[in-house]
Image: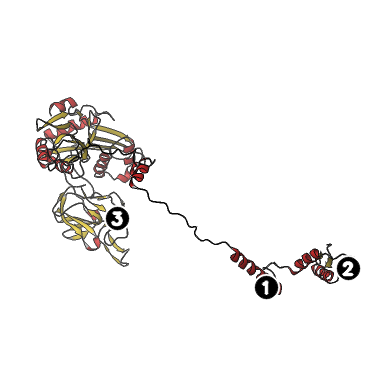
Amino acid sequence: MRALFQESQFGSQQGGASVSLWMTDSLRNPPASQPLNWRQRIEDWAQEIDLVPDLGQRVGSAIWFRGLATCFGLCAAALYLAPGFKAVPGTPTSLLATAQYDEIRSQMVTPLALGANSGRRMGPTDAVQPLRETPERPQIALNAQIGSSDSLSRALSRAGVSGADVSAVTGMVARDIGGGMLKPGTRLDIMLGRRVSRDRPRPLDKLAFRARLDLSLEISRAGGQLQVKRIPIRVDNTPLRIQGVVGDSIYRSARAAGAPPKAIQSFLRVITQQVDLGSVGAGDRYDIVTEYRRAETGDVEVGDLLFAGLRRRNGKAVDMLKWTTGGRTEWFEASGVGERRGVLSAPVNGRRSSGYGMRRHPILGYTRMHAGIDFAARYGSPIYAATDGTIAFAGRHGGHGNYVRIQHGGGLATGYAHMSRIAASVGQRVRRGQVIGYVGSTGLSTGPHLHYELYRNGRTIDPNSVRFTVTAQLAGRDLAAFRARLAQLRGLAVGRRVEVAQSADAAQGTQ
């Protein structure tokens, strides 16, 4: 069929209408010279009618409705001619007999935990006799550990040791572990023997543990009686000295040099009594001497701080030695003076965020007297007693939240508010620097901090207006012994434990 084109303002395009008219005339009046071709005429008629028009065009026209009818007709024919989905009947599988099931289960490649067997079962014969009771293991080895605030007797009882054996063990080792208390984390190796009957506990056959750094104990049963064997361990008791240069902070620099955390914390508390830690900068030198015990097995115990020194580039040098005189242990300067100078020591390691006086309350919204000073600190930071005294109050106290009040004598007292947890009790005697609680945000508080107050005769005063001075002066033999000890500690090699008070052999000989 040839295409006809018509001219329009948009250019030459195919003339669809002319083609349709031509096709209709051809069907009605075919040329006389052209033979009748019914197949060609049907195809032309189907193309003219267009049974499947585009339903997206000429919506609502007769051609569109004709196409919609065709679509529904095709869908109905498809649903009518669609196959069914009926279930195909089948013969059910017969259940296995017990013998068949056991045979199949014994040959399955399945873990035993899922019910399989490792082989076929053998049928019992006349030689098989049922047991009256399950046989017991001749010995049971156990490992236990001493927990916090735990005792040896409680740990042994939890492991199944009889009360009689527990009493015998604690009686034998009472002089080796005072009060029956062992260091938390101490390992107990326990061996329980065969019991006489099922209604009686197993006897203790063997027990081994580390009683102290310098002593190990082994308890064993011989001839029906428990016996103890004490194994001494050699220990070097020489102190440890660490020196270094302050970088970003004293704590980080000392930790990088290998100082134990416990010794650094004690060092900072001692130095704070003499200088402001904020004034200590890079380039200053620190000197730490602490008790240090090392066993021949490699175990280490870090004791109390003995000496704290600080050499400052711009400022006075500090040398503090721990000394006991008159039954009281204090920190003394190198000159033998135990004076504590300056205003009350900061009760917490933090930044002062608010002072004493009138201010606008951040929660209540009006101006009122702020009867103390605030220290911003991290939640859970320890709070220290400003000086020696007795706990007069410890508990909830209105807007103060968790609150502790210490009476210092002479009409003076200090208060510590907004604690997260209290670590002191009423009537307790506390010393300067002792932890009495931890920073929190209880009561009328907008965030973790310490509200610190100072009282005189029951009325609050500015904490910066009072100085506490406690003086202890060494003289005579005490002063001479003090200076000799100071010279010994200063003579320690850095990072090495050398003989100071007594050698390890001498210490072992006195045990």
In-image side of 323 versus 278 (left or right): left
Name which residue lies at 36% across and 45% down.
100
Task: Give how far across and how far down residue 467 sits, in percent.
Answer: 21, 51
Q: Which residue is mark 1?
A: 65
- How crowded pointer 3 is (Cα within 10 Å; few <14, some 14-19, many 20+) is rated as many
Task: Give how far across and how far down residue 47 sits, in percent.
Answer: 76, 66
Task: Give how far across and how far down residue 294 sits, in percent.
Answer: 23, 31
Colour scheme in the image?
A: secondary structure
- How crowded pointer 2 is (Cα within 10 Å; few <14, some 14-19, many 20+) is rated as few
The tag earlier along the polypeptide, 1 or 2, is 2
For mark 3, give the secondary structure: strand
Q: Quadrant of the C terminus?
A: top left
Q: Is residue 305 visible?
A: no
- What amino acid is found at the position of numbered circle 2 in the picture? Pro
Q: Which residue is mark 3?
A: 449
- What amino acid is found at the position of numbered circle 1 in the picture? Phe
Q: What's the distance in space between the residues labelled 3 and 1, CA to CA?
A: 81 Å
In the image, farthest residue toward the right: 33
Name which residue lies at 75% across and 67% down.
46
Task: Name the disc covering residue 31, or none.
Answer: 2
The tag earlier along the polypeptide, 3 or 1, is 1
- What amino acid is found at the position of numbered circle 3 in the picture? His
For mark 1, give the secondary structure: helix
Name which residue lies at 21% across and 43% down.
147
In-image side of 239 versus 197 (left or right): right
> Which marked residue is nearer to the observer: mark 1 or mark 2?
2
In-image side of 83 versus 110 (left or right): right
Q: Is residue 295 visible?
A: yes
The tag earlier along the polypeptide, 3 or 2, is 2
> Which marked residue is nearer to the observer: mark 3 or mark 2?
2
For mark 2, give the secondary structure: loop
Q: Quadrant of residue 188?
A: top left
